[in-house]
Amino acid sequence: MNPITPLSRHQTLESTPLWQQALAHAIRTPEALLAVLALKPEQLPRFFKGGDKFPLRVPLSFVARMKKGDPDDPLLRQVLPLSEENDFTQGYLSDPVGDLNASETPGLLHKYHGRALLITTAACAIHCRYCFRRNFPYHQQNAAANEWDEAIRHLEQDTSINEVILSGGDPLALSDQRLATLITRLEQIPHLTRLRIHTRLPIVIPQRICDSLLTWLGNCRLMPVIVIHTNHPNEIDIEVRGALRQLQTIPGITLLNQSVLLQGVNDNSDTLVALSEALFACGVHPYYLHLLDKAQGTAHFDVPPQRATKLFDEIHSQLPGYLVPRLAREQAGARGKTLLPLTSIAGGHGERSEGPSALS
Ligand code: SF4
């Protein structure tokens, strides 16, 4: 991942949007993070610095939602590098979901019928230790190269594509000016009807939902779908609720959430039920609960499928159907997400493909 650059010498504090100031001031060392949380290194003997390729990064507003003095805080666990990341685990890969085989032009991935995904940036506001793209070769795969020309050309020529997905990194780490330029070009492609944005920024820096973003997104010809990424109800505080309410003012918008089932973070039914309730209370539909994508360095987060389906049974028994996310895994080369059924319905642990209507 590329570093988020500190403010350039041409930017003054006053001219820089609040969310970019928050990005620039994110915590970048475990020592600083532990100090803010009043934790002693001996309480977390397994932490390490995260290395140069995927260093620790966490915005202060996200840290503010962690419990001081708690080494097991579920938000802390998502961002603090542990020494287990350095263990080699059989079956874990650098490209666990087959992104590179789906690359049609640099940074344009075409896996599923009707949808194409753009890698818009390597930058993220937060570095999630379980990230499936933590080893992704962003320097080779970036649709933003040459002002998006190759990606746009591919989208113009393939009339079977009606939905463009902005991914990364985090697409909302790009400036509104840069995003507006891209959207203007996408709008001119007549067979495109939907714009989907996968982002964790409204959660980790809710000020990202600013007037300028609401303006370009609100004026977009393409039907907007925002898929936020949150894993634990403690991530949703009053500012996040306000940001999500702001997004709902955009005509025709659909707001969905995807989570990853993570050991030590959200692998219990009470947390998952509370997460669905919290999301729906601010207008977001719980959509996917993903099994961990097996990226090398993430094995300590894995929840085995049998345990996952048992948890899924439990949340299904406590929530109305529309608040139960789909339990899914992504398999390299598959034509859609693979859904795991309820054990109580299926009587086993069989899987079925969701088919081409799946979210990417
Ligand atoms: S925000 Fe998404 S892409 Fe970025 S590190 Fe987290 S999981 Fe990975």
Image (cartoon, rainbow, N blue to C red):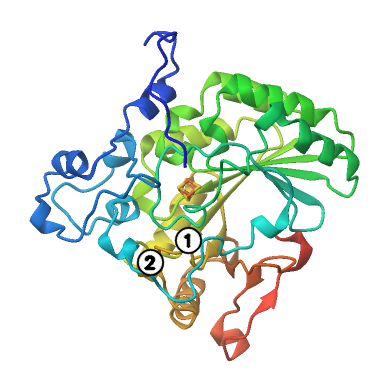
Task: Say which residue appears at 71% left-offset and 37% top-offset.
Answer: 252
Where residue 194 sits: x, y (%)?
A: 76, 41
Quick one: SS at disc 2? helix
152 vs 59, left or right, is right
Task: Say which residue appears at 52% left-offset and 53% top-offset.
Answer: 133
In the rendered image, the vertical position of residue 164 relative to residue 243, given as above or below: below
Where residue 226 sits: x, y (%)?
A: 61, 42
Q: In which quarter of the image is residue 125?
A: top left
Disc 1 within 8 angstroms of ligand 1 (CB): yes
70 vs 236, left or right, is left
Where residue 354 sits: x, y (%)?
A: 71, 69
The reply to whether residue 287 is in sight is yes
Residue denoted by label 1:
260
Task: Say which residue appears at 84% left-offset and 27% top-offset.
Answer: 188
> Do labels 1 and 2 touch, CB within 8 Å?
yes
299 vs 75, left or right, is right
Task: Say which residue appears at 45% left-offset and 17% top-offset.
Answer: 17
Say few, some or many: other residues with alpha carbon within 10 Å of mark 2 (under 14 / 14 to 19 / 20 or more). many
Question: Which residue is more in the foreground, 274 or 118?
Answer: 118
Quick one: SS at disc 1? strand
In the rendered image, the vertical position of residue 77 relative to residue 52, given as above or below: below
Say few, some or many: other residues with alpha carbon within 10 Å of mark 1 (under 14 / 14 to 19 / 20 or more). many
Residue denoted by label 2:
301
